[in-house]
Image (cartoon, helix red, strand yellow):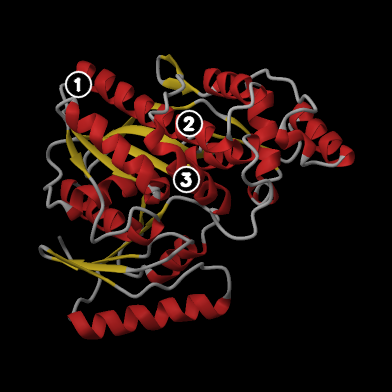
């Protein structure tokens, strides 16, 4: 590749420089939300250029129009306009690059995370893509649900659970943990938001579904730190994993997999008194089985037999291991992250190879 700088995303930011057949990650910078972090990014770039001798001729960034990193890339690019790379495409390309793929053969990319700017302006995050370095096609995605209150909703998994119940047509009955976790006035506000579509954006995020289920089974209703609800749900599932737990079933239509049947079955089990760890394990197995089923359908349609697992949700070791096991048993070659993290800390490597190949094609 020509000398290129990729600026990553706005969370867990790390820069990446590339030239020829080499790529170098910079240090972890963190969340690009203030001037001090942006200054740290500027210093990191200067230090990396000094260490590697790479003088970037091309800059790559995320497509999100509000990202500080993308704005910095616009200011930083002086010889060529920045190349903006779709978030989940970059995740899949990052996994491909770590495994030394040249990008000429596409893979089935499973990109699961909390937030990524979608082509339709909504929040993506439960994506199955057919991708190489030069492009991608959205083969399937999680059925969307409203995200009430944006970041405020993310900090309150009980509200995400209410939104998922609402999208699935399930009542907010008083015996559900997510409902009892909310005060009456909070329930009224969320109901108004969902009914009127006020301060709501549609999301297909798998990360947000994990948060919602964590609250629905009574594990975590309020998040005090990032990914708390999902981490505690994974821990609960791990404690019941060896008990031979069964799996719930997603609904499948063309281009969509729907969690409504999963939530319906989960609520029924909850009312039977099934312990939260067992519910959590059944949900994890349901997601892994859905991944395997969609990948089988993609292979039927395209003949592709390599699957890349990427995105922050695959920091969940329980889910990643189960997906890899099911896919391997079904004859797929599975590309997993190792040296490069699956979350946004590895995003810049994907941006780097996508931008380089797009410019090469031009």
Q: Is residue 60 above or below residue 78?
A: above
Task: Give the label, 3 or 1, closer to the camera.
Answer: 3
Residue annotated with mark 1: 302
- Mark nearest the camera among 2 and 1 is 2
Q: Is residue 286 left or right of residue 115?
A: left
Which label's residue is closer to the chain start, 2 or 1? Answer: 2
Q: Residues within 10 Å of mark 3 (few under 14, many from 20)?
A: many
Check disc 1: other Cα within 10 Å, few if <14, some if 14-19, many if 20+: few
Q: Can you tell which quarter of the image residue 78 is in?
A: bottom left
Q: Nearer the viewer, residue 361 or 248?
A: 248
Q: Position of residue 287 (x, y in %)?
A: 41, 30
Q: Residue at x 25, y 71 (%)?
A: 56
Please tell me which residue is depicted at 43% across the width and 44% down the height of the picture.
Answer: 238
Corner quadrant of residue 73: bottom left
| Mark 3 vs 1, N-terminal side | 3
- Residue 52 pos. (x, y %): 19, 80
Q: Is residue 139 visible?
A: no
Cα separation between marks 3 and 1: 33 Å
* Residue lying at the far right of the rendered structure: 185
Q: Which residue is mark 2?
A: 283
- Check the image and report above or below for 63 versus 106: below
- Mark 3 and 1 residues: CB-CB less than 8 Å, in contact? no
């Amino acid at each position: 590749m020509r000398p290129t700088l990729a600026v990553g995303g706005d969370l867990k930011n790390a820069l990446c420089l590339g030239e020829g057949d080499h790529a170098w990650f910079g240090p972890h910078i963190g969340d690009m939300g203030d001037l001090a972090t942006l200054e740290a990014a500027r210093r990191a770039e200067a230090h990396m250029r000094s260490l590697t001798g790479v003088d970037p001729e091309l800059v790559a960034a995320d497509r999100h129009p509000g990202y500080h990193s993308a704005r910095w890339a616009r200011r930083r690019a002086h010889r060529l306009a920045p190349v903006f790379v779709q978030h989940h495409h970059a995740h899949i390309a990052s996994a491909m690059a770590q495994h030394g793929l040249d990008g000429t053969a596409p893979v089935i990319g499973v990109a699961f995370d909390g937030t990524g700017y979608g082509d339709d302006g909504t929040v993506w995050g439960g994506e199955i893509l057919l991708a190489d370095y030069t492009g991608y096609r959205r083969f399937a995605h999680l059925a969307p649900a409203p995200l009430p209150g944006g970041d405020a909703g993310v900090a309150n998994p009980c509200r995400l659970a209410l939104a998922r119940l609402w999208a699935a047509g399930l009542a907010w009955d008083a015996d559900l943990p997510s409902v009892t976790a909310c005060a009456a006035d909070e329930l009224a506000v969320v109901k108004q938001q969902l009914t009127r579509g006020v301060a709501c954006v549609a999301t297909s995020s798998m990360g947000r579904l994990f948060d919602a289920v964590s609250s629905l089974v009574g594990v975590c209703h309020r998040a005090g730190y990032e990914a708390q609800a999902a981490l505690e749900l994974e821990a609960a599932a791990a404690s019941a994993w060896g008990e031979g737990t069964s799996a719930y079933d997603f609904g499948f239509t063309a281009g969509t997999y729907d969690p409504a049947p999963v939530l319906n079955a989960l609520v029924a089990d909850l009312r039977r008194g099934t312990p939260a760890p067992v519910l959590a394990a059944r949900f994890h197995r349901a997601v892994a089985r859905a991944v395997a089923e969609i990948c089988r359908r993609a292979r039927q349609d395209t003949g592709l037999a390599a699957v890349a697992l990427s995105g922050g949700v695959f920091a969940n070791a329980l889910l990643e291991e189960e997906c890899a096991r099911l896919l391997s048993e079904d004859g797929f070659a599975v590309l997993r992250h190792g040296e490069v993290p699956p979350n946004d800390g590895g995003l810049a490597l994907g941006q780097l190879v996508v931008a380089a190949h797009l410019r090469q094609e031009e």
